[in-house]
Amino acid sequence: MIKAPFDVATIRSQFPILQLPSELPVAFLDSASSSQKPEAVISALADYYRTTNANVHRGVYQLSEQATFEFERARGLVALLINATHHREVIFTRNTTEAINLVAHAWGGSNLRAGDVILLTQMEHHSNIVPWQLIAQRTGAVLRAIPIDSQGRLVLDDIDTLLQGVKMLAITHQSNVLGTINPIAELTRKAHAVGALILVDGAQSVPHMPVDVQALDIDFLAFSGHKMVGPTGVGVLWGRKALLDAMPPFLGGGSMIKTVTIESSTYADVPARFEAGTPMIGEAIALGAAVTYLMDIGMANIAAYEHQLSAYLIERLDEVPEVTWYGPPVGADRGAMAAFSMTGVHPHDIAQILDGEGVAVRAGHHCTQPLHVALDVPSSVRASCYLYTNTHDIDRLVRGLSKVKQLFG
Amino acid sequence: MSDMYRDLILEHHRYPHNFGTLDPHDVSQEEHNPLCGDRIRLDLRIVDNKITEVAFSGKGCAVSQAAASMLTDELIGMDLDQVRQYGKAELLDLIGLPLDKNPVRLKCALLSLKALKVGVYRYLGQNITTDELD
Ligand SMILES: Cc1ncc(COP(=O)(O)O)c(C=O)c1O
């Protein structure tokens, strides 16, 4: 019934964790939190430490040159994935969170004035809220949020009013709870029309669909390696070269300088200016392997498959009358995840019982407390898919929910 | 897992003991866990340093609500010195759940104990040390 543009069984065989011998193999439905890793990525990480380990941009010896070459090659691969005009626009950070903090502090610290508005949305992850609050407190800027409707879509009727005085629109591409895919290109046009910049939180979009920074015409994009079959410890900030060039440093230290005296320093060009200290070399190289892996399968193919998974997930959840799921109906603007509640049973209890059935889901507020206030539930259960998810995983989820009903019915 | 939802827990969740509020009361303490939204309010009547009546109300997962229900049964007749001695080990014994490796759910189980301790210490006008709550 689902026809994947690639062989899902082959994909699954490439993920060692999905092959672990077990009486109760895990139906892993928490990829939105952190994805599993294919052998190609795991071995790229290990190979770096086995064969190439040395600091980058420093040594004149062979190993260091090799490490530098691989590290910079990974940067180039990331630039290709998101269609950046130049690999120098790609900055390695620890994760999405650090990438957003970098922009909030380096750009916000030197561009925001008292009364300037930072526009967010009600569905943001805390990592796209708190950094802006910190810089707002320092600069006197104010925060505003685009509301959502009952189907978990942004309410854009008053967007022109909401955009008044806005200097930065910071918005998620895909909600990590509702699955809503936001109309970024349209919002970018509107933001630019009032002279505002747009930062896109791509933590949930870059892993799952083609994201082209030039086609979207955005200014900044943040995402995490660990959610896109890459390792933890590495993320990306992409920014327009002219904007990055004009930004002061975020963290100070080695690697990010040109000259240093005791009194003052001059700073390196981007991206080095924003990569203080020894970077996550092995992790960045392994992220390069993850990007290669995803591009070989094809982001459009992954998106097409996940679109079918999304429809299947919702269709199966609809068979359980006690389940209320959140977000838009199945369609082009919904990703392959569903946050839901079940009448009379707390999300923690649901997740715990599912765990006993070998189904891994997340329960809680998923770092979106303002969104849960808007949904008027303290927490929810979330099942999220990726390219290695199959319909059997979703069937096991639904069977687990029957068990929940049985225990709590 | 099934251990986690043994019949006693589900029974207390379905039919909680001492559910409600007390008015008037000597202690009324509400605690909540911002992570999952669990909420417990514990009301006590105290006569001569002894708990004579108890009620709880709240919302949340089966573990937090059932633990509160079981705890209230224990409290009637307890004196405040005993309350000060009563800790995590006693509560876990009482509810009989294997939560040592599950810090997230442990917080659920301990929410009513936290309300009890915070409320009683405040009643006594004493400071509570945080390790007593962990
Ligand atoms: C939409 C969104 N933004 C930001 C983040 C933060 O990512 P990280 O924890 O890797 O910084 C996440 C992941 O939890 C997310 O889903």
Image: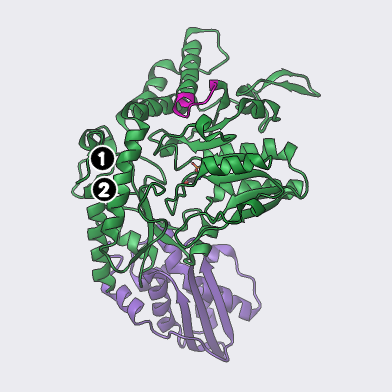
Chain colours: A green, B purple
Say which chain tag 2 marks: A
Asked if A202 appears above or below A81 in the picture, the reply is below
Residue at 30 percent of width and 40 percent of height: A305
Instruction: Choose between A77 and B8: the one closer to the eye.
Output: A77
- Measured from the top left, where is residue A136 in percent x and y? 71, 48
Per the image, the residue denoted by label 1 is A18
- Measured from the top left, where is residue A56 in percent x and y? 53, 17
Residue at 55 percent of width and 56 percent of height: A122
Per the image, the residue denoted by label 2 is A26
Say which chain tag 1 marks: A
Q: What's under tag 1, amino acid-wise?
A: Leu
Residue at 43 percent of width and 59 percent of height: B104
On the same chain, marks 1 and 2? The answer is yes
Sequence-wise, the earlier of marks 1 and 2 is: 1
Q: Residues within 10 Å of mark 1 (few under 14, many from 20)?
A: some
- The quadrant of the rendering that contains the C terminus of chain A is bottom left
Could you tell me if residue B134 is visible in this image? Answer: no
Q: What's under tag 2, amino acid-wise?
A: Val
- Measured from the top left, where is residue A197 in percent x and y? 64, 39
Q: Is residue B14 magenta?
A: no
State which region is magenta: A78-87
